[in-house]
Image (tube, grey):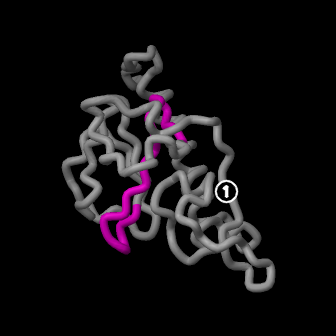
Amino acid sequence: SRPVNVLGADGQSREAGEVVTLNSIQTVRDALLGTSISDPGYRGNLGVLPSSVAGLIENIDSEPAFSPANARGWNGPYIVHSGAEYGDYIESGDNFPATPLGILSEPAILDGWGKPIILQQPDTLNARLVSAGSNRILETDSSDPIDSDRGDDIIVFLLTADPN
């Protein structure tokens, strides 16, 4: 049987939102981890992941500039940005991360339902990209490395397989 096409608040189907989200997450993943030796991505250039997805667009973590001599440093932007800012897409009740000073104006990459894709790093092994899913409420606990109660969130682990 054909999957049920459930519409979200903006009229976009759940299925279409998932396709857009998975494509966006893959693009962010590639920018973080690279696609080849000639495209090492953020982690390949710096040896670490940024503090948020915004680090792919702007040097928010004040990393050293890229040095061709040692092929290290921030060599971005690593991803094309549409101009979206994190704070423009966060509403009361969304359960998105608390906003430290400045994060509201950080650039954001959006999922298929118009919410920011979040980089969560609960520990050194379980870094992951998270979309709030079709209900647009972030249900994955950013401090829990396994978090089996994820609701409809879409999660892609970056450095390991999903421990669930």
Tell me the residue at 56%/77% (across/down). 47
Question: For the view shown, which residue lies furthest in the front direction?
Answer: 101
**Whole-percent x and y of residue 144?**
23, 61
Q: Residue furthest top?
A: 11
The quadrant where residue 87 appears: top left
Is residue 119 covered in magenta?
yes
Question: Does 159 sit left or right of 58 as displayed?
Answer: left
Label 1, residues with CA under 10 Å away: few <14, some 14-19, many ≥20: many
Q: Is residue 1 above or below residue 27?
A: above
Indicate yes or no whether the magenta region holds residue 67: no
Name the one closer to the observer, 106 or 17.
106
**Image: 162 above or below 40:** above
**Secondary structure mostly taken by the magenta-highlighted segment of the chain:** loop
Pinpoint residue 64: horizontal percent, then vertical percent. 64, 73
| Location of residue 146 in the rendering, given as x and y in whole percent from the top left corner | 24, 61
Three-letter amino acid code at the position of disc 1:
Tyr
Left of 20 or right of it: where is 142? left
Quadrant housing the C terminus: bottom left
- Extent of the magenta region: 109-127
Q: Residue furthest bottom?
A: 70
Q: Mark 1 sits on what residue?
A: 78
In the image, is residue 75 above or below residue 103?
Answer: below
Q: Nearer the viewer, residue 40 or 102?
A: 102
Image quarter (top left, top right, bottom left or bottom right) of the N terminus = top left
* Callout 1 secondary element: loop
Q: Residue at x 44, y 47 (%)?
A: 103
Residue 100 at x, y = what percent? 36, 51
